[in-house]
Amino acid sequence: MRKIAVVKFGTQVLAVNGQEFNYGAIKRFAHEIAAVKAAGWQVVVVTSGAMLVGRQQLRNPNVNRSFWPEGIEKTSIPHRQVLSCFGQAELTRSWQRSFEEYGYPGAQFLYTNDHFADEANRDMVRDQIELCINLEGVPLCNENDGETAAEVGKRFTDNDQLARLVAVTLGAARLVLLTTVDGYFADGQLVKKLTGQESWCPDESFANGGFEVSRGGMESKLENAHLAMMAGVDSYIANGFLEDVITGILLHGKNPGTFGPGRKAV
């Protein structure tokens, strides 16, 4: 396995109290990623948060609110698409500005399920991201919500799925799924190591998929961690609010949450 890590940041990890986009969080994560890059790792970012940022963009006093009734994005696909487009531009710029402080350019990659539908498309994804990495850039990946919101077949289940597909396509060594809880819990206890045989039992105390501008939750993280493990990728589910969570995993071999060892080829 190459020293590539795919790190997925959920919307709530990038939010303050689940409501406001937290630019400081991106700066903190960029600092950690720069540290692990300096130590020889290459990091691919999979970032949620476009719709959250889009809502803040629409607070601009020049926006004509008569075309945006309160809550319209919940029922109108065009409004949801436009919300994502407003947010995606600023989301990417925020990551780019943060990485530029450390001398690394950030490159935006927007995907639909079609990009992973067959070998030829997966090869294209791999070649593009690897070129970005070779140029010492930081790939910034997200779902192309502006295109997929209207076409169910093109949508990912969530960005946990996208992160896993990117990790497997690249042959990454690590998949890190950052969330707002400490990991996967069973019977109220944190599971430190996955076997691949776990089944999901909903527990509202530890589920995190209810935020209205995010998708997924612990069920998705567990499923995609299992699938990544089967493909040979070591997988982690960890709390993104923990200090130095990325450097702890990649530089110091820590398991701050739940770890699933990748199945090794025979």
Image (spheres, rainbow, N blue to C red):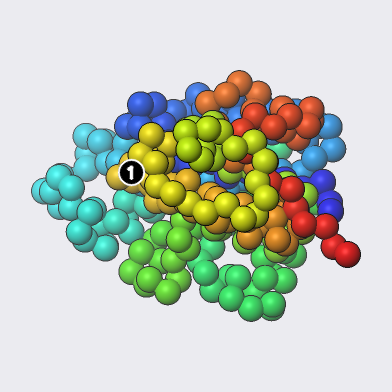
Residue 72 seen by the camera: yes
The residue located at (61%, 33%) in the rendering is 257
Secondary element type, mark 1:
loop
Horizontal side of 162 relative to 101 (left or right) equals left
In the picture as drawn, the residue positioned furthest to the top comes out as: 243
Front residue of 195 and 12? 195
The image quadrant of residue 78 is bottom left
Horizontal side of 143 relative to 73 (left or right) equals right
Q: Which residue is mark 1?
A: 210
Front residue of 117 and 110? 117
The residue located at (46%, 56%) in the rendering is 158
In the picture as drawn, the residue positioned furthest to the right comes out as: 266
The residue located at (54%, 63%) in the rendering is 111
The image quadrant of residue 168 is bottom right
Residue 53 seen by the camera: no
**Residue 132, x across and y down, in percent:** 73, 53
The residue located at (65%, 46%) in the rendering is 194
Tell me the quarter of the image containing the C terminus. bottom right
Mark 1, other Cα within 10 Å: few <14 / some 14–19 / many ≥20? few
**Residue 170, x across and y down, in percent:** 74, 59
Eyeballing the image, is 142 above or below 231?
above
Horizontal side of 14 relative to 152 (left or right) equals right
**Residue 75, x across and y down, in percent:** 20, 59
Mark 1: which amino acid?
Gly
